[in-house]
Amino acid sequence: MPTSSQKQTMNDIDCKDLLLLSWKPLLQVLQNLLRITNEESNIQLLLNCYQNFIGVCGSVQCYEPRDGFLESLCSFCLSENITSTQITKQGSSNKQEVSSKEHILTDKNVQICKTLLNIAHCLGYILDVKSWYIILETM
């Protein structure tokens, strides 16, 4: 008969296997929903799913799914608008078109940034150097 520590190890392995099998489709669904949703309460529910999944993955040491969810969340923090401007060189009639990126924060972006900071604050103990790098690079 298995001891309680053996049962715990078996449960962790089962949980880890489930996470490894399900994280990619789940991430794809959450990304699509977060992309199209603009209502604050629905966005918060989706962000709670992100946070919970990151927490569970970190707890059972599933690093690839955890970092995948973090990268996805970070990609939603800043929206980029590409604007192009024409520059005329002094003394020349040649015009050059230059593209520049502007970051415009919407309410949705701010809400996502707050969740990312909350993850860093509350779940910092399950993050490793790579995870911290992903978060700090975004902020």
Image (spheres, rainbow, N blue to C red):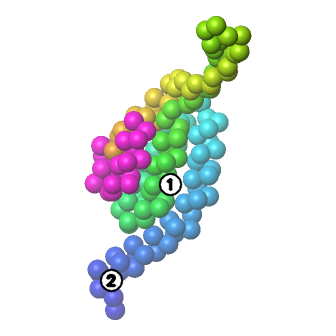
| Residue marked by disc 2 | 6
User: Secondary structure beneath disc 2?
Assistant: helix
Residue 101, percent from left and from top: 56, 26
Q: Can you tell which quarter of the image residue 115 is in?
A: top left
Residue found 36% across the figure and 38% down from its top: 117
Q: What residue type is labelled 2?
A: Gln
Callout 1 amino acid: Gly
Tell me the quarter of the picture where residue 96 sits.
Answer: top right
Tell me which residue sits at (35%, 78%) in the image.
Answer: 9
Image mark count: 2
Q: Nearer the viewer, residue 105 or 108?
A: 105
Q: Can residue 124 be seen in this view?
A: yes
Identify the residue at horizontal 57%, vertical 53% (top origin). Answer: 27
Q: Name the residue under label 1.
A: 68
Q: In this view, does 133 lie to the left or right of 84?
A: left
Q: For the magenta stretch, what is the residue range? A: 121-139
